[in-house]
């Protein structure tokens, strides 16, 4: 599908404070993405730094709380309807904790992206991948962005960044490295999608 001004129309999903999402919006405000328009941030919790930043930039925000619905499927039906009504092309999950079910996957085939704090195929299906890497004693971990499918933390890999774990590293010393590299990997991933998308329609 084509978007207004021939740009990809993005939505960001976030259920926490949204550090990666806020950093992505900062990049967007500086014109880093030439062929993308971030037009919607869907969030759940307050305070949400990503939602606050979106508001500053004049980007629409919608607060959608999963517990307001009878189950995850009903919540995602509403989420899908919102995304479709806004003519969203691609969705980026940035600090988003819910598993995407088949109905939403069908609505956005190969167009929902995620960031995971490990190098695929290591430490999948966990919300504590950084801690797990430390506990396991690996020397190198990292970050992966990928297109999601119906299997948890799998799908097409888009970009990866390796991060060395030093002898005295702990979560507090390692997490800032993930935050710094993560924002750059998200930006790289959006540029990858821009290139692939416009090649596919031209």
Image: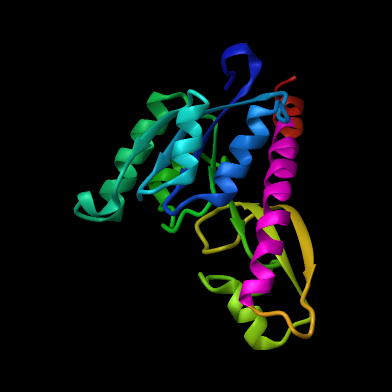
- The colour scheme of the drawn protein is rainbow
Q: Which residues are magenta?
A: 171-194
Q: Is 59 rendered above or below residue 130?
A: above
Does residue 189 belong to the magenta stretch? yes
Residue drawn where x is 63% and y is 87% of the image:
135
The reply to whether residue 113 is in sight is no
User: Camera-side residue: 97 or 83?
Assistant: 97
Query: Where's the C terminus, which quadrant?
Result: top right
Q: What x and y, as percent, mark residue 18?
A: 50, 50
The rendered magenta stretch, by its main secondary structure, is classed as: helix
Q: What x and y, as percent, mark residue 196?
A: 74, 34
The reply to whether residue 51 is in sight is yes
Q: Is 63 rendered above or below residue 116?
A: above
Q: What x and y, as percent, mark residue 176?
A: 67, 63
Residue drawn where x is 73% and y is 55% of the image:
181
Residue 5, picture quadrant? top right
């Amino acid at each position: 599908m084509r978007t207004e001004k021939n740009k990809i129309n993005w939505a960001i999903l976030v259920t926490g404070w949204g550090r990666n999402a806020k950093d992505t919006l900062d990049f967007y405000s500086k014109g880093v993405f030439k062929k993308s328009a971030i037009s919607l941030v869907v969030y759940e919790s307050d305070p949400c730094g990503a939602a606050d930043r979106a508001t500053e930039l004049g980007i629409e925000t919608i607060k959608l709380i999963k517990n307001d619905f009878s189950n995850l499927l009903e919540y995602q039906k509403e989420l899908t309807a919102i995304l479709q009504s806004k003519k969203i092309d691609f969705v980026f999950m940035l600090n988003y904790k819910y598993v995407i079910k088949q109905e939403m996957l069908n609505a956005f085939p190969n167009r929902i992206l995620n960031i995971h704090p490990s190098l695929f195929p290591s430490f999948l299906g966990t919300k504590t991948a950084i801690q797990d890497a430390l506990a396991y004693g690996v020397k190198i971990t990292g970050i992966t962005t990928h297109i999601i499918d119906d299997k948890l933390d799998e799908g097409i890999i888009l970009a990866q960044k390796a991060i060395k774990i030093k002898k005295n590293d702990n979560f507090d010393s390692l997490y800032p490295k993930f935050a710094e590299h993560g924002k750059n990997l998200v930006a790289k991933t959006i540029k990858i999608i821009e290139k692939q998308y416009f090649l596919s329609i031209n």
